Image (tube, grey):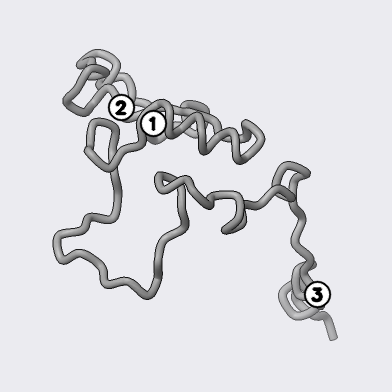
Amino acid sequence: MRLSFSAWYIPPFALIRHVHEINFGYEATVLTDNDVQGKPGIQFGNLTAAVKANATCKAFPGDSDWPSTQRWAAFNATLGSALIRIKPLGTPCYAGTDYNQAACQQALLNSFSGDYL
């Protein structure tokens, strides 16, 4: 009797019984309550406090909730300068100082390319 490939093949991940997390060295640094004490701009949230009815889930550059350059620097210092300040690829498509119609068009045309992303 001849078995088909699917009858005898066992995917390698099916043989793994325990999964261990693999972290980069810089991921060993974690913030604690003591690290942010006295720094209201970077304190952890209060999960027991009521959420504002008009709260939004994100802050964007230019919003009043967006941290100033000084707050970013203070937060970055607590992380050992691990923050990377990036601009999303779609930034040129949104109104503001970075709006650029040609760059936006380029981003849209390349948005499905893995090489671009």
Q: Residue at the spot x=60%, y=55% of the render?
A: 34
Left/right of residue 35 with respect to residue 101 in the rendered view: right
Q: Circle 3: is it few (<14), some (14-19), or many (20+) Cα within 10 Å?
A: few
User: Mark 2 or mark 3: which comes first in sequence?
Assistant: 3
Pick the residue in front: 43 or 23.
43
The answer to which quarter of the image holds residue 59 is top left
The answer to which quarter of the image holds residue 108 is top left
Q: Is residue 102 above or below residue 19?
A: above
Q: Circle 1: is it few (<14), some (14-19), or many (20+) Cα within 10 Å?
A: few
Q: Circle 2: is it few (<14), some (14-19), or many (20+) Cα within 10 Å?
A: some
Query: Mark 2: which amino acid?
Result: Thr
Q: Secondary structure at mark 1?
A: loop
The image shows residue 7 at horizontal and vertical percentages of 75, 80
Is residue 98 visible in the rendered structure shown here?
yes
CA gap between label 3 and label 1 equals 36 Å
Pick the residue in front: 13 or 90.
90
Query: Mark 1: which amino acid?
Result: Pro
Task: Say the numbered circle drawn on residue 111.
Answer: none
The image shows residue 103 at horizontal and vertical percentages of 29, 16
The image shows residue 80 at horizontal and vertical percentages of 66, 35
Labels 1 & 2 near each other (Cβ < 8 A): yes
Q: Is residue 7 above or below residue 61?
A: below
The image shows residue 75 at horizontal and vertical percentages of 52, 38
- The residue labelled by disc 2 is 91
Q: Residue at the spot x=20%, y=64% of the render?
A: 52
- The residue labelled by disc 3 is 18
Query: Mark 3: which amino acid?
Result: His
Of all residues shown, which one is farthest toward the right?
1
Q: Residue at the spot x=40%, y=26% of the render?
A: 69
- The residue labelled by disc 1 is 88
Of all residues shown, which one is farthest toward the front?
38
Q: Secondary structure at mark 2?
A: helix
